[in-house]
Image (cartoon, grey):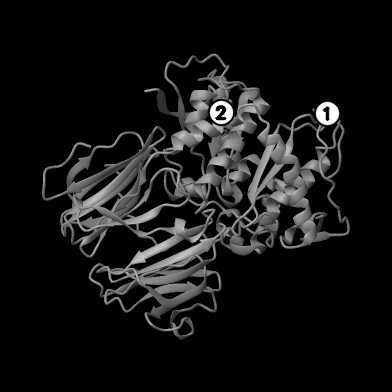
Amino acid sequence: MAFKYPAARRDESKVDDYHGVKICDPYAWLEDPDSEETKAFVEEQNKLTMPFLEQCAVRPQFHQRLTELYDYPKYSCPYKRGNRYFYFHNQGLQNQDALYVQDSLDGPATVFFDPNTLSEDGTVALKMGRLSEECEYFAYGLSSSGSDWVTVHFLKADDLMKLPDVLDRVKFSCLAWTHDARGTTSNLNQKLYYHVIGTNQSEDILVAEFPDNPKWHSGVTVSDDGRYAVLDITEGCEPVNQLWYCDLQKLPNGITGSVACVNQRHLLVNYVHDVKDILQLYELSTGGLVRDLPLDVGTVVGLSCKKKHSDFFYKFTSFTTPGVIYHCDLSQASPDPTVFRQVEVFYPSKDGTKIPMFLVHARGLKKDGSHPVFLYGYGGFEHSIQPYYNVPYLLFVKHLGGILAVANIRGGGEYGQTWHKGGTLGNKQNCFDDFQCAAEYLIQENYTTASRIAINGASNGGLLVEVGVMDMLKFHKFTIGHAWTTDYGCADHLEQFKWLFEYSPLHNLPPAPQAGAVYPAMLLLTADHDDRVVPLHTLKYCATLQHGVGSSSGQRQPLMVRVDTRSGHGAGKPTAKAILEDTHIFSFIAQTLGLSWRE
């Protein structure tokens, strides 16, 4: 069926000059999220999209089953402060995780801090929380509606009495207590401050600033003995100021994920080898391997330990494991830590580079080319996409007969900085080639056909499917976008402008209606309070897409946008909103691919 899309005003007079190249930006007015015209555009788009999503055939079953399967107890990896143990816990469908405390591992647990009490709809979230070394105070940052902006509050840890201290307008901040519990560090406007308990924010002590380098971001780590404060500085998202040591004879294809000291004399080392985690214990003095901690194919998503403690915790997850928390005590003997099949395959990219990809599907699957595929990728900022538990993915596999495919394309951190650099700046095309070749591999291996592949990416990963960060010529001018130039480049520089313009999703759309322009079904996703990848990217792309493609007589598949309200980039999203969003995504896929629900 053909869709009638809302009309959006085009301002043809808005033209930008990039190094002598004139580029029209007719929907620049959508860059103002607070204008009445932008709000009206969003409202009209949601009036079109939401009824379509709500009437999708599998929507009731998917939402019901997703809610049922999401309703299981979830725990974070515990950590110790003073003589007490702390961990986050969600009973199942609570909108936000609550922080619990135990006096001992065998003792009863009580709620220490519950953000669910702060709003009826769960849109006030705990974005950061730090206990002082001996558990005298708790500093915690709250955000509203998914925003990156945080307000930091303080309370006494023994009686939970709230203190009058408040730190406003905090964003991407560190919270590091000095061991005397007199105060904590925080960041404000690219400056580092020290806040003394019992004083006003205006009295905070300036610790570090870099007026000659306004893009520098600083953070502090306090040493285990409390004597030193270690200042680390980054510019943008570039992984700098890091010292790496790796024995290439022992682990030729691995990279170090994290290293922590435990039990006074041991190093706990988390390696990543072919995108799978390895956990090992070494002697601190000699570097000799003490033991391997057995892991299945998956990811260590939580690790908490202290040099002075003999015990530590780690949490393990995979595509088919919600999460298992292990408690290891080095003063005691070492513990030994069926419906789906998860495998890792390697496929060649356009230039011959071998790319790893995880597949999850039903056991006994026949490679007959009939299966729908959900292909996901990210490929940026040295971020590795390792196995993680995701209920909607498993519903897609079991109840829609699908295959989950996660391609570990270049630009990520799966094989260290070389892998990362291979998908950044002038090499960004490798990301798109790697992703395209993943789809081609799945077709060649007779898992599926081109018409049964749904592709997905979010945030940086949205570039792969032309959603997310879409105006690559102007992204650096909004909120934290300037920090991404280390991966993308900046259109202010001629050479970088050339490659950005070549792949910028917005600028690769037909600028005017074209006969015969036909696109596959598209569901764009954004949120009104996303102040990281701001909504303007999606809104301008949507308006251009509907104008240039949606008006074509041959376009029968929907080209829609879902703008969530009172939501942000993703962190702190209430459980109810997350369930509804995933329901809409997979209902849309089922509807447009012609999939039916199966028990």
Q: Residues within 10 Å of mark 1 (few under 14, many from 20)?
A: some
Q: Residue at x 68, y 49 (%)?
A: 470
N-terminal label among 1 and 2: 2
Q: Is residue 224 visible?
A: yes
From mark 1 to mark 2, how far is it between C-alphas?
32 Å
Q: Vertically, is 499 above or below 531?
A: above
Tell me which amino acid carries mark 1. Answer: Gly
Residue pictured at 14% horizontal, 49% vertical: 330
Q: Secondary structure at mark 1?
A: loop
Query: Residue 259 falls in which quadrant of the image?
Result: bottom left
* Badge nearest the viewer, 1 or 2: 2
Q: Quadrant of residue 114?
A: bottom left
Nearer-the-camera pick, 258 or 348 = 258
Label 2 packing within 10 angstroms: few (<14), some (14-19), many (20+): some
Q: In this picture, is 257 found above or below 457? A: below
In the rendering, at what x and y percent does residue 214 appear? Answer: 56, 73
Which residue is labeled 1 in the image?
554
Which residue is disc 2 drawn over? 61
Asked if residue 545 is positioned above or below residue 124 in the image, the reply reads above
